[in-house]
Amino acid sequence: MPGKIRFAPSPTGYLHEGHLLSALYVWAAAKKWNLSIHLRIEDHDQSRARPEYIRSIYEDLEWFGFEYDSDSIQSNRKPVYEAALEKLKREGLVYPCYCSRKQLEAENPKSATGEIVYSGKCLHAAEAHAADAPHNLRVIVPDETIHWHDLRLGDFDENPKKQCGDFPIRDRDGQWTYQFAVCVDDIDESITHVVRGEDILSSTARQIALMRMLGRETPPAYLHHPLIVDTAGKKLSKRELAHSLRQDREAGLSRETLLGRVCFKAGLAASPAPIGLADAIYLIYQIL
Ligand code: GLU
Ligand code: ZN
């Protein structure tokens, strides 16, 4: 059976150079490993997603010439998430957490990367709270090491219980979390390959753990690509990331100019000379 890869932007802003680099990686991987391409609009957080950002994702991809085989949008898939939540609940793997953000900060240790490691304080707290008291839903993470392999970065052994503890699958406002929605979708949409930026590296072990709980034993193959850095080698600033591809194209820059610039910034090309889409994809194809 041929595999399937996804490009999964969140419509919480316009696409920027970081997304463009991710798209190039996804399309290069699809070519290399003969995968079909799925576009997933990750609007799991309805408080942050906006229709103009969704429209713009489609327009930007079309303008660059990125073609895909199928697409989906998370806000249309409520029953799928409900069913996955019910499955976890039936297995006794979900509990409400009543801790405020302040409490979470004050009461829990942090991991080496500065992430809060939730203690599990509310595991048996449901009776002590009114049913309508604000709460998120957390999944009980097994205390075990997940061994996984990144196609670029090699082997990882990580224990999500120690990285983050039991983590939220639905937030206080009733929005599905990224971790939950992405796992449900990667299963339900039969995704075999996940190619995405290194900024998400620390989520992978917990996603593999959650997918197992949801019934998928064999996780997708993963590749986390390097992020664009500025000339001083630092991560792009919020301001730089807020600079959208859309602004550039409305300012009259050509797609070849934008592709050349992003390939240069990613260290894929020696100069920012304009480059076509197929050639940009081929630069990555060669290093996969
Ligand atoms: N929606 C995420 C983002 O825009 C990507 C999630 C993923 O690829 O797993 O950063
Ligand atoms: Zn709690």
Image: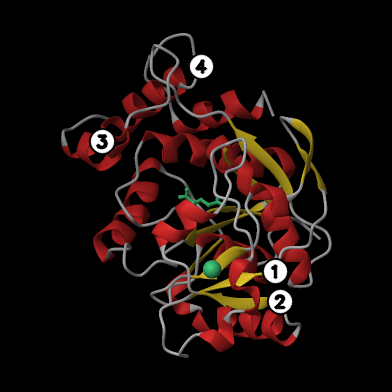
Label 1 to label 2: alpha-carbon separation:
5 Å
Q: Mark 1 points at which residue?
A: 140
Q: Mark 4 points at which residue?
A: 267
Q: Is mark 2 on a helix, strand or loop?
A: loop
As shown in the figure, which amino acid type bears the numbered disc 2?
Answer: Leu
Determine whether the beta carbon of the residue marked 1 sits less than 8 angstroms from the nearest atom of ligand 2.
no
Q: Mark 2 points at which residue?
A: 93
As shown in the figure, which amino acid type bears the numbered disc 4?
Answer: Gly
Q: Name the residue under label 3.
A: 243
Label 3 to label 1: alpha-carbon separation:
39 Å
Front residue of this view, candidates 170 and 102: 102
**Ligand 2 quadrant?**
bottom right
Front residue of this view, candidates 283 and 267: 267
Task: Find residue 214 and report its horizontal and vertical position in percent.
Answer: 73, 72
Nearest-to-viewer mark from 2 and 3: 2
Task: Find residue 12 and report its horizontal and vertical position in percent.
Answer: 33, 55
Above or below, 242 relative to 86: above
Label 4 to label 2: alpha-carbon separation:
44 Å
